[in-house]
Amino acid sequence: MIPILLVLMLAFPQAQDRPALTAQNIIEAYRQGISVPALLATIDSAAKVAPATEADLAAMRQAGVPAEVIERYQARSAGQAAQVPQNVASGPEDPRLKDVVRLVKAGLSEDLVINQILFSGEVYRPSVSDLLYLKDNQVPESVIRALLQTKDKAEVAKNGPEAKTLSEPKTFLSLIQMKGFMKKNAPGTLTLKEGQLEWVDGKNLEKNFQLQLSAIRMVWLECSPRAQGNFCYEINLETFNGDNFRFRDASWKTGVNTQISALYDTLKTYYPQIIFQEKVN
């Protein structure tokens, strides 16, 4: 048993400061009679594994090393190589992103983190390294999109919105205004005019109202994941004073979302100063 124990100690290093496990270590251990389960366990637990070259793989096959051991060694080597680029940099190129990671890891909701980003006045231009840093730290994609959006908003503020104006009103038919729990939803139409949205209630004209576009802080779509792509079934309009107006296509239960999608795209085209998002639940 003593020779085998020595082989295990020398051939299969566990500490980070010891040499990487090599194909030759595997061959020597196999020749000493180390069992296949022990070889597999050692490969899995090794701190470092040397790159598996074609010559190494050929040498192990020639020495009679079982195929499952060779495959495990090759897989561990490839997986280790794939992790290297993620750990090249100790931090982001933009040090402000460390604060974003801190907010996320502190347990703040995505909405709160996004609001902090968008209303801080900071402009972010994350590099590829920054994006990898954010991903490695489990920052949600919605937060990353908000960081990228600050650049777009800065360009709009600098150069002004695109020179696009409504030539005529646009009406979105067959909508339902969602009123929430214990309230009856209302059918009607929305008309987008220059500078405002006008709701015409289909049952009670006293419920008609106008909403100034300058009062809208954020527009987002509520979506659910589908195999063929996200299905966005509701548009939300949130004002700066906290009011929220929700609309769906009248036939949304049968998979129809043409009107709210058209409204979302139109607002995004003509009013780029508003914050736009898609939320997948």
Image (cartoon, rainbow, N blue to C red):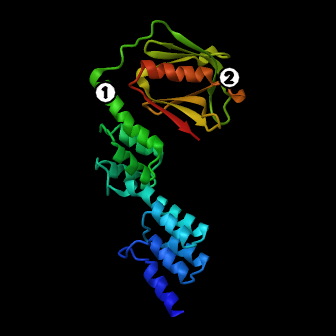
Q: Vertical placement of 17 versus 238: above or below?
A: below
Give the x, y percent position of residue 91: 32, 54
Q: Secondary structure at mark 1?
A: helix
Q: Which residue is mark 1?
A: 155
Residue drawn at 31 percent across, 20 percent down: 160
Task: Single out the mark in the foreground, 2 or 1.
Answer: 1
Left or right of 211: which side holds 64?
Answer: right
Check the image and name the residue furthest to the top.
168
Can see residue 21?
yes
- What residue type is disc 2 on? Ala
Residue drawn at 72 percent across, 27 percent down: 254
Give the x, y percent position of residue 199: 56, 17
Can see residue 111?
no
Q: Secondary structure at mark 2?
A: loop
Locate residue 152: give its quadrant: top left
Check the image and name the residue furthest to the front.
62
Q: Vertical placement of 32 versus 129: above or below?
A: below
Left or right of 61: which side holds 269?
Answer: left
* Cα–Cα span, label 2 and label 1: 37 Å
Front-lying residue, 230 or 260: 230
